[in-house]
Amino acid sequence: MNRKDEHAPSERLRLHVPEPSGRPGCHTDFSYLHLSTAGEVRRPAIDVAAAETADLAYSLVRVLDEEGQALGPWAPALSPDALRRGLRSMLKTRIFDGRMLIAQRQKKLSFYMQSLGEEAIGSAHAMALHPGDMCFPTYRQQSLLLSRDDVPLVEMICQLLSNERDPLKGRQLPVMYSIKRAGFFSISGNLATQFIQAVGWAMASAIKGDTRIASGWIGDGATAESDFHTALTFAHVYRAPVILNVVNNQWAISTFQAIAGGEGTTFAARGSGCGIASLRVDGNDFLAVYAVSQWAAERARRNLGPTLIEWVTYRAGPHSTSDDPSKYRPADEWQRFPLGDPIARLKQHLMRLGEWSEAQHEALHKELEAEVIAAQKEAEAFGTLADGHIPSIASMFEDVYKDMPLHLQQQMAEARRFGGRD
Ligand SMILES: Cc1ncc(C[n+]2csc(CCOP(=O)(O)OP(=O)(O)O)c2C)c(N)n1
Ligand SMILES: [Mg+2]
């Protein structure tokens, strides 16, 4: 054998390109999710070392079983009133999303993004936070706002309509709210920035000796951004008081979560690899979401460090009003998703406890629908995109500098000359 033969390659090299197991017309095989049974996964001590949570990054914390029973060490002690409040937040979010979607189709707003199927995550997480804590959400955490009593629906709808009462003056895309008093940081369209901002804010809170914690949000797809990894390093090194939420809803527009790296491992495992306590949790289980959020918040408040949580869920609607999912996934995929519908699951649990009935559910649905319709009517009186009641062209140039510099004055005059209305 000469030297050349010795090093001859035995196989042509190739790359692995992950593919979803289902496509339009072909059912998804959801065995890739690797589920645990309800009540099975252990609950570690609050001061557990990050390295000792490694197994929790590969299992799935679940509380509610198929029959609606709450099982195991993560079952939280929530009163029936608190559970009914949670159900109300989720239902309100779903009804709000449904109405705003129709309003977009009626051209009253330019764009909308639903959180259909993901309502438990923000609704339960919000219950674990304190006033003054700060969330750095993406565009799919409206349930964080809709579960609060101090954010009027009219204010949210005016933002969506970009009308004259829009607190953001039409400068943000609809759904990109900014409500500081509600602990809801301005949504940035640049994904993954939420994570570095949340960690930075949490570090600042600790530097100031404050008691407020941060909660950062990211989707499965956006974890592929370098900001995600930078945020984990800072959070780990300085033990920042932050909760790092990864919402794995299986899709990033038309891209399956495996393309962002969820195939051979989990998104939660990214956290434990970085020395951060990490858990993978059933995001459609209101009780599991509350219990794990509460655990992570307590760790942050007690200077025990950051926690990364992968919420496993399913984006049941299109990515946005500009998307058509029938092009890339089976139409009935949500019905077949093994973690079910978060609203139906909490409803079933409450009914099992004897604390809820079909009649109460129907009445709540009607009441919330009337509330959303009334707020929409009130907000529309301040204008919609369809009737042209939008902020003046001048508002594009205002509020940037204390005194408008000459070049902006010139550009504003030019915009007006070329037909911009005041
Ligand atoms: C840095 C960055 N890259 C790309 C985009 C375009 N974009 C908007 S939404 C989206 C998909 C994000 O998917 P994921 O993070 O899984 O969140 P989801 O929409 O599923 O909630 C992309 C690629 C963006 N907004 N920001
Ligand atoms: Mg996603």
Image (cartoon, rainbow, N blue to C red):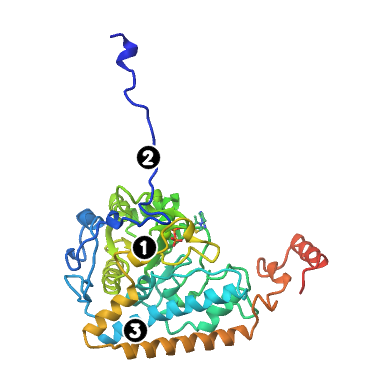
How many marks overall? 3
* Side (left or right) of 107 relative to 133: right
Q: Residue at x 58, y 87 (%)?
A: 378
Q: Amino acid at mark 1?
A: Asn
* Side (left or right) of 277 relative to 45: right
Spatial CA span between label 2 and label 1:
28 Å
Q: Nearer the viewer, residue 135 or 205?
A: 135
Q: Which residue has dot 3 on it?
A: 85
Q: Residue at x 32, y 75 (%)?
A: 128
Q: Is residue 206 visible?
A: no
Q: Nearer the viewer, residue 132 or 368?
A: 368
Q: Which residue has dot 2 on it?
A: 16
Q: Amino acid at mark 2?
A: His
Q: Nearer the viewer, mark 2 or mark 1?
A: 2
The tag earlier along the polypeptide, 2 or 1, is: 2
Spatial CA span between label 1 and label 3:
22 Å
Q: Amino acid at mark 3?
A: Arg
Q: Position of residue 344 (x, y in %)?
A: 32, 77
The tag earlier along the polypeptide, 1 or 3, is: 3
Q: Which residue has dot 1 on it?
A: 245
Q: Position of residue 409 (x, y in %)?
A: 77, 65
In which image quadrant can residue 291 be found?
bottom left
Labelled pair 1, 3 in contact (Cβ < 8 Å): no
Determine the residue located farthest toward the top in the rendered image.
Answer: 2
Q: Position of residue 164 (x, y in %)?
A: 65, 79
Labelled pair 3, 2 in contact (Cβ < 8 Å): no
Q: Quadrant of the C terminus?
A: bottom right
